[in-house]
């Protein structure tokens, strides 16, 4: 959980920061984009680019086997349309306005790990998700209560 701080910056939690830095050849670059199905953002390190190329190959092969059209150029633009955001040693970064809008981001971020990538949520938007999300919503709600108890957010 991270709050919007001074200079309009958020902070990547240390566990996520270490993973992103390690998967970006020790560069401090966070890749963020609008998630393709959920009302949140998806984040990852630069190494994911190679996996995205392999994903394009698999999708194209599957489309050909099924006799379906596949627009590799369009799909490539969608997959590689993420923002490369630098962050400092403390994990502070500025999120572009369009991503804040896409992710319905306000003053708080909830990071949730999920394999090749992680999701970044506005806790209020996450809370609106269906019952399949209950374990994630519960975790997020607990962190929001901790932040509120510390008086950092009203």
Image (spheres, rainbow, N blue to C red):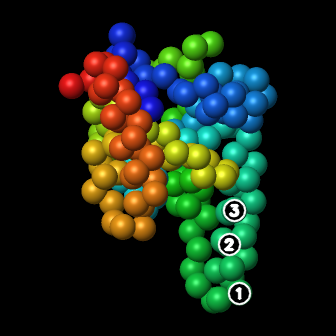
Q: Position of residue 42 (x, y in %)?
A: 51, 46
Query: Which disc is residue 55 wearing?
Result: 3
Q: Nearer the viewer, residue 104 or 98?
A: 104
Tell me: 128 left or right of 120: left
Q: In the rendered image, which quarter is residue 102 located in?
A: top left
Q: Earlier in the sequence, mark 3 or mark 1?
A: 3
Instruction: Tell me the tag on residue 80.
Output: none
For this rendering, which residue is in front, 54 or 4? Answer: 4
SS state under label 3: helix
User: In the picture shown, does residue 50 fall above or below 13?
Assistant: below
Q: Is residue 95 left or right of residue 154?
A: right
- SS of the residue under disc 2: helix
Q: Position of residue 152 (x, y in %)?
A: 31, 19
The residues bearing labels 3 and 1 have C-alpha atoms spaced at a distance of 15 Å
> Where residue 49 sits: x, y (%)?
69, 45
Q: Is residue 15 above or below residue 9?
A: below
Residue at horizontal 66%, vertical 37%?
A: 45
The answer to which of marks 2 and 1 sits earlier in the sequence is 2
Q: Is residue 98 left or right of residue 23?
A: left
Q: Who is closer to the viewer here, 64 or 94? A: 94
Mark 3 or mark 2, which is nearer the start of the sequence?
A: 3
Question: Which residue bears the numbered disc 2?
Answer: 60
Which quadrant of the view contains residue 15? top right
Circle nearer the viewer, 3 or 1: 3
Q: Which residue is mark 1?
A: 65
């Amino acid at each position: 959980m991270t709050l919007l701080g001074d200079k309009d910056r958020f902070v990547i939690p240390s566990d996520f920061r270490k993973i992103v830095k390690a998967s970006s050849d020790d560069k401090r670059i966070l890749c963020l984009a609008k998630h393709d199905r959920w009302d949140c953002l998806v984040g990852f390190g630069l190494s994911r680019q190679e996996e995205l190329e392999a994903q394009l190959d698999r999708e194209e092969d599957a489309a050909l086997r099924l006799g379906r059209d596949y627009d590799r150029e369009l799909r490539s633009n969608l997959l590689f349309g993420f923002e490369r955001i630098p962050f400092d040693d403390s994990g502070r970064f500025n999120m572009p306005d369009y991503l804040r809008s896409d992710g319905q981001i306000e003053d708080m971020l909830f990071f949730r790990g999920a394999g090749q990538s992680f999701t970044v949520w506005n806790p209020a938007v996450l809370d609106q998700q269906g019952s399949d999300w209950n374990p994630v919503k519960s975790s997020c709600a607990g962190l929001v209560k901790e932040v509120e108890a510390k008086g950092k957010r009203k």
